Image: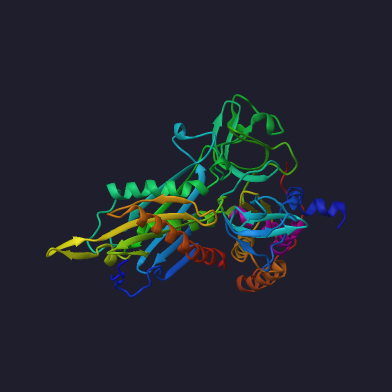
Amino acid sequence: MTPKTTKRPDGRANDELREMKAKTGIVKNADGSAMFSFGNTVAIAAVYGPRKLLPQHLQNPEKGKLRCYYDLASFSVTERKKPGPSRRSSEISFVTGKALEPVIRLDNYPNTVIDVYILVLQADASTRCAGINAAAMALANAGIPMDEMVTSVSIGKMGDIIVADLTKEEEDFTIEKNGKEEKAATDIPIAVLSRSKKISLLQLDGKCTKEDVKEAVQLAKKVSSKINQVQMEALKKVK
Amino acid sequence: MDKKEKKNIEKDEEINVEEKTNPEEIEQDRKIVVPGEVIESGSDFLPGEGTRREGKEIVSMRFGLLDMNDKLIKVIPLSGAYVPRPGNVVIGHVYDMTFNGWLIDIASPFNSFLSAMEVGRFVNKNDLSETLNFRDIVVAKIKDIKSRGIDLTMRERGLKRLEGGMLIRINSAKVPRVIGKAGSMVSMLKQETGTNIIVGQNGIIWIGAEDVENELLAKKAIEFIANKPFIHGLTELVKKFLEDEKKKMKITIKPIGPTTEEN
């Protein structure tokens, strides 16, 4: 095996996450809210509900509905983002909902809806992961029955190393090949349930082998407990 | 306090007394748990509300305060929307009328219906608005919860249409603290502020007094309680808070006499 040569730009160890910060109860009018940040990536989430689902034909008498809305603030990225839903944000809203749904006991709230609004205030890659972490905390803060927490982290392949929690710089990592710049980074956002260590989100953007994915999942499971620790500490800090 | 005196001071006392089954005073030293956290392992304990058993371990399913009573483990929620239960006394307003009753908004996600039969006095079926009109505030009790919604009743003492006064809203998880052990907190508030207070389990509180200043004082005190949930000996603290406020507002409280309301 060849020695791994690539180094991370900020000098972190391969399994080291950026500094994480978390806080709950930040949106006064919401039933539950939280902030979660990975370094420069900051996401806030607000939960409203369970509340009545209207129009009535959308109601499900068997179980409640979870609606997720993810968006970037227009000032969160270097180039101004046009506000409002886009192709990208509606996809992320969908996968976030799918990542959170398995832990929420929606059958306790028939005919109702739980709305989760995620807003990214600062984007430096891994925004959907920060969003999921914040949303899980906001749901817990809203007193909604959940089997466990959801933690999420983006694992990436950068050149020949597998690293945890990519930054924008690492996401755009390139290598020179035949005198040409070539994209050499792969981004794999993964959501891991805190207790059962099941996977509720796995996306992949870039090139990598089967072994790489396996390694990425292992790494995500390993760092998930660190994220959960931060979430738990923030939730328990009640004034 | 003898029976007669009690009757005079507060007709609504009966409403608050039955609350004691659910709330207890919440102390600071209770542990806070989050979903997925292992509370206890082994088979010595039983999982109660807000918890579940997973193999040998008892795991929390909610964010809240841990309550270990004997061998039953419960998690008391600290936040969240109001979840109605049969027997709860709630305050709400009329937002719709049907041919045989009213729809009441009790700040819960489910429809709640008050049938004309459940008012406990004569109702003119041709004109329901004679009894209760839009935006009228009522104290009602949850009679039944069915899949299609909640049935309310007003056929009990103290359940009535509210007139005058002011409504404030707090988180329903904080209602037990406002009521206190066996209604101790709320009766203290009534006495100290010279007001009539009805606490709905849905977090809507009605304050009535002859003087607006008294109502405002009670409102301040309730908000004080809602913002300071964890302190042991909250009743004493609230008493002190009220004394300070009274000095600031320069009002004197005359003890409350017999209530003038009929019903």
Could you tell me which residue is drawn at 68 percent across and 56 percent down? B176
- Residue B188: % across, % down: 73, 62
Q: Position of residue B241 (x, y in %)?
A: 65, 71
Between B99 and B181, the one lying in front of the other is B181
- The image quarter containing residue A195 is bottom right
Which residue is drawn at the image coordinates 39% and 61% (left, top)? A43
Q: Seen in the image, is B84 located left or right of residue A103?
A: right
Give the left or right position of residue A204, taking residue A229 as reference. left
Going 73% across and 41% down the picture, which residue do you hit? B263
Look at the image and tell me in which quarter the C terminus of chain A lies: bottom right
Report the residue that reaches farthest toward the front: A1
Residue furthest to the bottom: A11
Say left or right for A68 vs A4: right
The answer to whether any part of residue A121 appears in the image is yes
Q: Nearer the viewer, residue B35 or A9?
A: A9
Q: Which residues are magenta?
A: B171-193
Colour convention of the picture = rainbow
Q: Where does the image place residue A123, in percent across and percent down from the top left?
A: 32, 63
The answer to whether residue B111 is above or below residue A13 is above
- Pick whichever, B99 or B182, lies toward us: B182
What quarter of the picture does the N terminus of chain A occupy? Answer: bottom left
